[in-house]
């Protein structure tokens, strides 16, 4: 074994006695352990919340979205859909029409409300339709009448009876802004209200209440008077992480003057940025624990240098270079960092793994949330960063004591009393 490592280990902890310096060193090592463990646990929980919110929103939002920038929608959507499906990793491309409309319940105009109408291709939506609370997700025409599917909260608020045997006896009307505008330009004309048969109610786990209803694509085009044009095209990929690559490929093929391409991150960028800021803000605050432990390491190793100055002088008199003297005390910092960081990783990963598997810590008032326990997602990159930073701080804390030890004059150190 290298003599420098043996000396460094002997200076840190002696088997014969427990000194004040050993106690201070142990406290510093414990601080590093607790700091690393706290960082691992908190980062894993923050990652868990981030992944949960992302999956929640992506269940509604597409992986990639193409929209027109000219304000008139996208014409010839079929050719654009074929081109989008030719991009690698794209599994589906669905045109849609969206807009605001006034929802008119049957026989009770006081309960009318503005909703977000989303027109989709019924065949394409079957693969990713939201969870149904009642009825079926059927927006096609049946017996000459188009269907509508709405959020279950809207149905309850409007007093519409739930679907039975896949259909509902209730009908609602939709009145769009373009229809109202055309009515105002005509004399003695009543606004054209499109009637829809309620086919079912869905429950959508969403971070916000969108008051959303689904109708057929052609019905939405007729409602908003956009025949032959769509609002945009939603793409689903085989892997969520490939959204940036798909966006870059689409931007190369599409004119930036006519089309805009957004990923799932771009659609909710402000929310995701805030969550990332919270994650790294919490990391910096908890990192103070490791920084304080590093200052303790400076103090404890400086005390070791003062106590062992005569030994350092003897080593130099025996031919040990100043460089190797510095390495001895740098090794002491490395030993503290390695043991403290290692124990912290074991403790932090153990706690995070137990929470991930057994949900040991439930969320307060969990019945008000969509999850019952704190979510955990262990990211290897976070573990590596925490380990490298903690170990680096410990080694950096040993620089001053190492330089001070190497500056000791051998002749004066040997003559000093113990």
Image: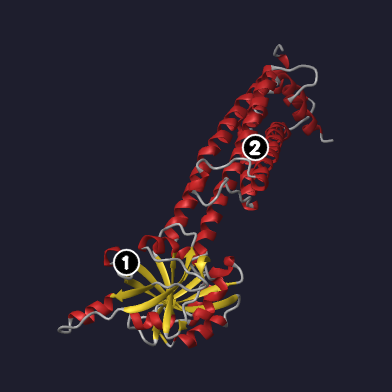
From the viewer's side, name the closer residue of 365 and 152: 152
Asked whether the viewer can see residue 128, the reply is yes
312 w.r.t. 123: above or below: above
Q: Position of residue 295 (x, y in %)?
A: 57, 30
Residue 82 placement, left or right of 342: left
Q: Which residue matches tag 1?
A: 114
Q: Secondary structure at mark 1?
A: strand
User: Which residue is the site of mark 2?
Assistant: 395
The residue located at (30%, 69%) in the rendering is 107
Q: Quadrant of residue 117?
A: bottom left
- 314 w.r.t. 143: above or below: above
Give SS at disc 2.
Answer: helix
| Camera-side residue of 177 and 1 | 177
| Residue 53 spot, x, y in % from top left | 51, 56
Colouring used for the render:
secondary structure
Residue 333, given in percent of the width and then of the height, sits at: 67, 33
Q: Which mark is residue 217?
A: none
The residue at 44%/56% (across/down) is 271
The residue nearer to you, when weighing 22 against 365, is 365
Q: Earlier in the sequence, mark 2 or mark 1?
A: 1
Q: Are marks 2 and 1 in contact (CB under 8 Å)?
A: no
Crowd band around label 1 with a 10 angstrom C-alpha radius: few (<14), some (14–19), many (20+): some
In the image, is residue 276 above or below residue 344?
below
Q: Quadrant of the N terminus?
A: top right
């Amino acid at each position: 074994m290298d003599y420098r490592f043996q000396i460094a280990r002997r200076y840190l902890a002696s088997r014969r006695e427990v000194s004040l310096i050993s106690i201070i060193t142990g406290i510093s090592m414990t601080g590093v352990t607790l700091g690393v463990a706290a960082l691992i646990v908190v980062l894993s929980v923050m990652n868990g919340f981030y992944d949960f919110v992302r999956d929640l929103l992506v269940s509604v939002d597409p992986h990639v979205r193409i929209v027109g920038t000219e304000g008139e929608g996208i014409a010839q959507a079929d050719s654009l859909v074929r081109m989008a499906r030719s991009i690698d990793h794209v599994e589906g491309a669905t045109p849609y029409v969206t807009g605001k409309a006034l929802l008119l319940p049957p026989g009770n105009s006081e309960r009318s409300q503005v909703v977000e109408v989303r027109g989709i291709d019924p065949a394409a939506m079957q693969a990713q339709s939201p969870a149904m609370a009642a009825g079926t997700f059927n927006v096609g025409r049946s017996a000459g009448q188009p269907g509508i599917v709405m959020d279950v909260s809207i149905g309850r608020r409007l007093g519409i009876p739930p679907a039975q045997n896949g259909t509902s006896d209730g009908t609602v009307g939709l009145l769009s802004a373009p229809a109202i505008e055309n009515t105002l330009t005509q004399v003695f004309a009543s606004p054209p209200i499109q009637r829809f048969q309620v086919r079912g109610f869905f429950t959508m786990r969403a971070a916000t209440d969108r008051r959303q209803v689904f109708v057929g694509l052609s019905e939405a085009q007729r409602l908003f008077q956009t025949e032959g044009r769509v609002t945009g095209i939603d793409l689903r990929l085989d892997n969520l992480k490939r959204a940036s690559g798909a966006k870059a490929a689409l931007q190369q093929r599409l004119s930036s003057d006519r089309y805009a391409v957004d990923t799932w991150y771009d659609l909710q960028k402000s929310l995701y940025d805030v969550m990332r800021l919270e994650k790294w803000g919490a990391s910096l605050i908890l990192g103070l624990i490791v920084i304080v432990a590093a200052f303790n390491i400076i103090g404890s190793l400086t005390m070791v240098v003062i106590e062992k100055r005569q030994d350092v002088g003897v080593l130099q008199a025996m031919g040990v270079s100043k460089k190797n003297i510095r390495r001895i005390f740098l090794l002491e910092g490395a030993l503290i960092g390695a043991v403290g960081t290692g124990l912290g990783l074991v403790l932090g990963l153990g706690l995070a793994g137990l929470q991930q598997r057994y949900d040991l810590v439930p969320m307060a008032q969990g019945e008000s949330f969509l999850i019952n326990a704190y979510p955990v997602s262990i990211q290897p990159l976070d573990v590596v960063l925490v380990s490298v930073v903690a170990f680096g701080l410990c080694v950096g804390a040993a620089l001053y004591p190492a330089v001070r030890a190497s500056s000791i004059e051998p002749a004066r150190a040997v003559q000093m009393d113990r």
